[in-house]
Image (tube, rainbow, N blue to C red):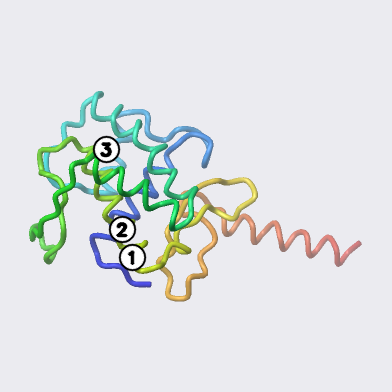
């Protein structure tokens, strides 16, 4: 499934942010200003970014809300997305900047970054819901990981998150189990 650039970017940023939560791939990986800078390097945002402790705390606080989008089905996501859009006072508008073609911004550039992240994630999930592609939103199939992912593959076969080495680890475990059965 090919989503448009801003939708894919927002989905990747939301999954990345959710996967910083403690307990999903180990410890909380969004604790320090350095962690926050690393997130912003991988997931750039336009507009006002203060990079202070209050902004970091606000970003950390929205993670469980975003996580809920991976815990529900398509119909269950609709009220969550609508609530995010309402709370962020979303007012979509077309913009073009920084080498990106026309795309949608739904908040002002000076809205708090946490608000912009929530609204951009909600707008991206609007596209997922409308395209009836919610089966591409998943929780890692590794038996020791609860990380999340969005499957951007052509055939919809993704099963593991990108935050760890889950796919390789599970393949090695399966190989070892097969070998153990063969020698037993």
Residue found at the very far bottom of the displayed protein: 155
> CA separation, marks 2 and 1?
6 Å
The picture places residue 94, in percent across and down from the top left corner, at 10, 60
Q: Which residue is mark 1?
A: 130
Q: Residue 45: horizontal and vertical position, in percent?
A: 19, 47
The dot on residue 126 is 2
Q: Secondary structure at mark 2?
A: helix
Mark whose residue sits in front, 2 or 3: 2
Residue 182: image x %, image y %?
Answer: 86, 67
**Whether residue 182 is situated above or below residue 31 in the rendered picture:** below
Q: Dot 3, how many residues are within 10 Å of its Cα: few (below 14), some (14-19), or many (20+)?
A: some
**Residue at (64, 61) in percent of width and height:** 171
Please state which of residues 29 and 22 is positioned toward the viewer in this rendering. 22
| Disc on res. 37 | 3
Given contact means CB atoms under 8 Å apart, are the residues at marks 2 and 1 in contact?
Answer: yes
Q: CA distance from mark 3 to mark 1?
A: 33 Å
């Amino acid at each position: 499934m090919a989503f448009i650039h801003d939708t894919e970017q927002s989905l990747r940023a939301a999954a990345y942010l959710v996967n910083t939560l403690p307990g999903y791939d180990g410890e909380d990986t969004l604790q320090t200003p350095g962690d926050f800078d690393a997130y912003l390097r991988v997931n750039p945002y336009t507009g006002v970014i203060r990079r202070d402790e209050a902004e970091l705390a606000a970003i950390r606080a929205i993670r469980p809300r975003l996580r809920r989008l991976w815990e529900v089905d398509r119909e269950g996501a609709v009220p969550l997305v609508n609530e995010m859009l309402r709370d962020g006072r979303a007012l979509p508008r077309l913009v073009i900047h920084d080498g990106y073609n026309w795309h949608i911004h739904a908040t002002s550039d000076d809205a708090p970054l946490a608000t912009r992240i929530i609204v951009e994630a909600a707008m991206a999930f609007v596209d997922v819901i409308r395209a009836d592609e919610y089966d591409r939103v998943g929780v890692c199939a590794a038996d020791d990981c609860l990380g999340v992912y969005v499957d951007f593959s052509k055939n919809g076969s993704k099963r593991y998150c990108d935050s760890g080495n889950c796919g390789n680890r599970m393949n090695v475990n399966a190989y070892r189990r097969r070998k153990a059965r063969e020698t037993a």
